[in-house]
Image (cartoon, helix red, strand yellow):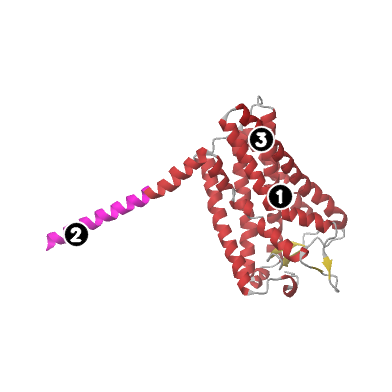
Amino acid sequence: METNNMTIYGIQQRGHQLFWMSGYLITIILSVLGNIIILLATVKYKAIKLDKVTVTLILNIALSDLGHTMTTVVPRTAGVYDPEWVIGLGRVVGEIRVCFGYYFYQSSMFLVMTLNLSKVTRLLMPLRVTRSRSGRMIAGIVWVGSALWPALFLLVDPRDTYFDYRVYVANYGFRSPVWVYLLPVVVVMLGVLPNLVVVVTTIVLLVLARRISRRHKDRLQRLGIVTVILIAIVYCISNFPLSVYLIGQCSGAAQTDEEGREVGTWYIEFYRFAWNVIPLNNLANVVIYTCSINSFREFVRDKLWLGCRRRNAGSDRNMNMVVVQRSTEISKDL
């Protein structure tokens, strides 16, 4: 697999590499555990008591976050630990990582945008009946639409991948002349507009939530609004730096050295920072649901926390009974 210059773009100090690798490992553990809890709560225990479309989209957001963790954060951890081993896996593995990494990143963006739009629509048209089938249909359309980035990569130049030492993972190069004209359009359509929709709909939801709180309407509806707003805020925080970077790149913000290579704080450090903030979106939702949804908080407390304590207490009692029984047998033998 082709690479860029490690001396220019890589993290030189091993201590810094270990620091980032530790952060990635913590992110993987928290993201996987948190999203598995969300999947259990939505699929098996039906513990999220909101409207059916919102619950369906929450389920799909958890799947998308898991996919992004597996296709981006896990490879980055391996890349920081041993970049030569990752590079040795070959170009095909890099192409697969790039396609699925962009796919899950885009699906997360589209799902949050759809969640906001569905909640605004439900508030503005409260008499409209929503069904779980509608939620599944909407989620299916989102998953299909999220394949636009991988489809463009395959159409333009599927081999334009390299190991990027800025983020220690296989990345797409955008080196074909077609991207000079195509990339700004795609960034606006697949990046700027969805983020703009999320920001605008979040502001609308804040206004509607204030009106609903004044009128003392349905408490379940208020919980749904608060949950969607918190999801959108965390999403905006985690994705804003990368959106700024993409807009800056399309505007020619990067500096170049004597050999024409893009260098500088903007191209290296800010890009690395933008990638490091994105996983915040993968692990924050379980905290949001615990704080804003009573039924989910009760599920975590009763099924997970108290359930684990009961199992531990039961195992301790069984162990004590075995010890007592064994002591009795020994005393009889004596």
| Residue at the disc numbered 3 | 119
> Do callouts 3 and 2 mark residues in contact (Cβ within 8 Å)?
no
Residue at horizontal 43 percent and vertical 43 percent from the top? 302
**Chief secondary structure of the magenta span?**
helix
Q: Nearer the viewer, residue 11 or 164?
A: 11
Task: State which tag comes first along the sequence, 3 or 1.
Answer: 1
Q: In what element is the residue under mark 3?
A: helix
Expressed as whole percent of the image width and height from the top left, the position of residue 144 reads 71, 44
The answer to whether residue 153 is visible is: no
Task: State which tag comes first along the sequence, 2 or 1.
Answer: 1
| Residue at the disc numbered 2 | 327
Give the left or right position of residue 155, taking residue 307 as reference. Answer: right
| Residue at the disc numbered 1 | 106
Q: Compared with residue 155, is residue 4 higher up or lower down, i.e. above or below?
A: below
Q: Is residue 241 magenta?
A: no
Mark 3–mark 1 Cα distance, whole angstroms, equals 20 Å
Residue at horizontal 85 percent and vertical 53 percent from the top? 182
Q: Amino acid at mark 3?
A: Lys
Locate residue 257: give its quadrant. Answer: bottom right
